[in-house]
Image: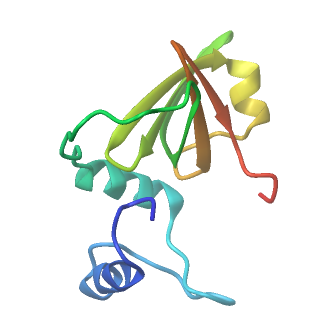
Amino acid sequence: MLLGVSDDTVRRWIESGRLSSSTAGGPTTVDGAELAALAQQTATAPELGSPVAASARNRLTGLVTRVVKDTVMAQVDLQCGPFRIVSLMSAEAATELRLEPGVLAVASVKSTHVVVETPATR
C-alpha cells in the first residue's frame, strides 16, 4: 500500500534481490530504512484529473525517509506514496516520536502546517 504495489510485487522484489528481507524468528520482514529508500526511488506523481472536493485536513500515511536534527529543530521527510512531505518540528518532538528512517508515520496537513503522528501500536 505505501509503495503503491501489491504484496506479490514486494515478494518478487525480495526474490530478485531488489529488496532484502529477514525471516529470523517469524514472519518475513524488511528493513524500514531500505523500504524508505525504495519508496523514494519508485515514487511517481499521479496523473492530474479534474478537481474534486477535498477536506480542509488531509492525512497522508508514509515512511520517514530522513530526519535532520540540531539542538532545537528537526526536519522530517516522509515519502507518502508519490508525495514527499517535509515537516519542521522541535527536535524534542522528533525524539519523543522516535522518528527515524523507515518508521511508519502519518502527516496531517492543514494549510501550511504539517503535523506528524505515529500509530499507537508501535
Instruction: Residue 35 in the image: state x and y as whole percent.
Output: 42, 60
Give the colouring mode of the picture. rainbow
Left or right: 113 in relation to 52: right
Q: Quadrant of the N terminus?
A: bottom left
For the point 47% across and 32% down, the residue is: 54
Instruction: Residue 83 in the image: state x and y as whole percent.
Output: 35, 39
Left or right: 86 in relation to 106: left
Viewer-closest of 96 and 108: 108
Identify whether 47 is placed above or below 108: below
Instruction: Residue 16 in the image: state x and y as whole percent.
Output: 24, 84
Viewer-closest of 18 and 55: 55
Left or right: 98 in relation to 43: right
Instruction: Residue 103 in the image: state x and y as whole percent.
Output: 59, 50
Q: Quadrant of the C terminus?
A: bottom right
For the point 20% across and 39% down, the residue is: 48
Identify whether 39 is placed above or below 70: below
Count of marks placed on residues: 0
For the point 18% across and 45% down, the residue is: 47
Identify whether 121 is placed above or below 109: below
